[in-house]
Image (spheres, rainbow, N blue to C red):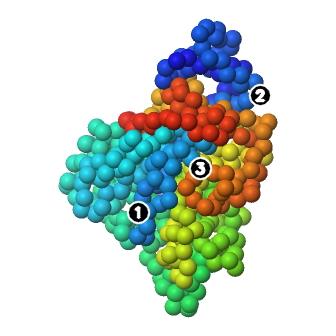
């Protein structure tokens, strides 16, 4: 099976150039000018941008949260991902405390296998530390799991600082990298107890009990532990201006710090929590919470300066009915937003078309950096001969509209309802096969991607 993508503009982190792309079997056979069509099926890409398949390094499909399970499983979540140009997700395998990492990984592979329509990998959550887990890290690497996750908040998952430090040393030894959820748990608990005691139980209390300084404090604390351990770390879903200052300080000291942010922190403001319609506000509950306009602008500036390495979604979707579990108490609202479907279009519209970042920047944070950071470069993340035939054909001449009624995400709302897009995802190829054709998701089979060490 050969396909010639003819006459488009190929985007990489280095820039844009006019080039044809020849897909043969599952791979890219050639990229260049005037490639001969031969017996290939020819697709006219005139006027369109060709990106390497987007990689979402932060999704939660088929995850139990607050006694309910995310609305998207690997079947629906991966189809929504593909529809928006995301050809690979890295989800989080989360073993229960006391469960081996091997058993946790087996459970997550089972959730995805045969169901995922896009390619996938897993970060492994470390919420406990002992000899057994320490030994298992090598087994994980041998099975293509080279990135890990630790939490500084959530009593069910947070790891004590001493253990986090031990885990960082061990990751350094085995060449793994950890992403960390940074928020100060102790003070959040105090602020939450105060809000509840005062009867302030609506979603308006959510951002007020998890203010930006508590994220920045945890970022700073983590970065000092990473300095001592002399190991790079990833700050996942960084949302606050103050947190960026902590990252800059650590980088000035010579530390390697990777930063991920999410579309909702780049595009929304905390006023969404003050909506008098309780459930409208509840739909936006996620952690860290959506911040202020000044944070949003600081994130855009950092993105355009190359201070942010990846933009991922933290897709963790619930329906409004599921969010109703917290209709009398904001602390019982399952936390998380849908978003895996719309990341590329939002970043193009509000980043590239708005003149805040270039298409090359977009390629860097959606494709190239995640592929390097998560150890699947150059198989993923680049349109180069020998790479997987994962291609997003983006049409900047067509505008669109984001609505819940039209989306493939398995929820009844989107945080971007009624938002216009300055582009459309015309077609998506997954390992050489047409996976999406003008919004229609075709039958494809995702593969588990064995990942190596961080190359960023
Ligand atoms: Mn998450």
**Which image quadrant is residue 157 in?**
bottom left
Q: Secondary structure at mark 2?
A: loop
How far is disc 3 from disc 2 in space, using C-alphas? 26 Å
Q: Is residue 228 placed above or below 197 in the rendered structure? A: above
First in sequence: mark 3 or mark 1?
Answer: 1
Q: Nearer the viewer, residue 418 or 186?
A: 418
Q: Secondary structure at mark 1?
A: strand
Residue appearing at x 56%, y 36% in the figure: 442
Location of mark 2 (residue) = 47
Q: Are marks 1 and 2 in contact (CB under 8 Å)?
A: no
Q: Is residue 218 placed above or below 437 in the rendered structure? A: below
Residue that protrudes farthest toward the left in the picture: 131
Work out whether residue 158 can be spotted.
yes
* Neighbourhood count class around disc 2 (C-alpha, 10 Å): few under 14, some 14–19, many 20 upward: some
Q: How many marks are shown on the rendered structure?
A: 3
Nearest to the eye among marks 3 and 1: give it. 3
Residue appearing at x 48%, y 85% in the figure: 193
Residue 427, percent across and down? 64, 33
* Neighbourhood count class around disc 1 (C-alpha, 10 Å): few under 14, some 14–19, many 20 upward: few
Q: Is residue 217 placed above or below 111 in the rendered structure? A: below
- In the image, which disc is placed on residue 64? 1
First in sequence: mark 3 or mark 2?
Answer: 2
Q: Nearer the viewer, residue 213 or 101?
A: 101
Residue 371, percent across and down? 50, 37
């Amino acid at each position: 099976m050969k396909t010639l993508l003819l006459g488009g503009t190929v985007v990489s982190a280095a820039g844009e150039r006019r080039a044809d792309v020849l897909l043969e079997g599952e791979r890219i056979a050639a990229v260049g000018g005037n490639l001969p069509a031969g017996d290939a099926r020819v697709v006219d890409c005139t006027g369109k941008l060709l990106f390497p398949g987007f990689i979402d390094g932060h999704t939660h499909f088929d995850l139990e949260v607050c006694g309910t399970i995310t609305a998207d499983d690997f079947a629906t979540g991966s189809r929504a991902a593909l529809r928006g140009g995301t050809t690979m997700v890295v989800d989080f395998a989360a073993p229960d405390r006391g469960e081996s990492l091997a058993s946790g990984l087996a459970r997550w592979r089972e959730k995805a296998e045969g169901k995922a329509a896009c390619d996938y990998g897993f970060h492994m959550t470390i919420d406990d530390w002992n000899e057994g887990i320490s030994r298992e890290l090598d087994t994980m690497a041998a099975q293509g799991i080279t990135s890990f996750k630790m939490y500084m908040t959530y009593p069910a998952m947070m790891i004590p600082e001493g253990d986090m430090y031990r885990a960082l040393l061990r990751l350094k030894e085995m060449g793994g990298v950890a992403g960390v959820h940074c928020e100060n748990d102790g003070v959040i608990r105090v602020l939450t107890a105060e809000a509840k005691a005062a009867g302030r139980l609506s979603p308006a209390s959510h951002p007020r009990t998890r203010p930006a300084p508590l994220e920045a404090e945890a970022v700073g604390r983590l970065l000092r532990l990473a300095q001592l351990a002399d190991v790079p770390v990833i700050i996942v879903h960084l949302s606050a201006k103050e947190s960026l200052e902590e990252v800059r300080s650590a980088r000035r000291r010579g530390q390697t710090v990777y930063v991920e942010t999410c579309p909702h922190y780049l595009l929304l403001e905390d006023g969404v929590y003050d909506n008098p319609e309780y459930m409208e506000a509840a739909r936006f509950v996620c952690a860290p919470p959506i911040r202020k306009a000044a944070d949003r602008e600081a994130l855009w500036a950092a993105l355009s300066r190359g201070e942010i390495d990846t933009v991922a979604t933290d897709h963790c979707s619930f329906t409004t009915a599921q969010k109703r579990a917290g209709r009398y108490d904001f602390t019982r609202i399952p936390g998380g937003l849908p978003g895996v479907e719309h990341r590329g279009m939002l970043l193009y519209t509000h980043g590239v078309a708005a003149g805040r970042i270039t298409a090359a920047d977009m390629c860097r944070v959606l494709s190239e950096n995640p592929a390097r950071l998560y150890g699947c470069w150059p198989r993923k993340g680049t349109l180069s001969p020998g790479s997987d035939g994962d291609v997003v054909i983006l049409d900047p001449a067509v505008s669109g509209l984001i609505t819940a009624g039209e989306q493939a995400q398995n929820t009844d709302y989107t945080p971007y309802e009624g938002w216009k897009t300055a582009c459309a995802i015309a077609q998506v190829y997954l390992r050489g096969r047409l996976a999406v054709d003008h919004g229609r998701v075709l039958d494809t089979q995702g593969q588990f991607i064995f990942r190596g060490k961080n190359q960023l």
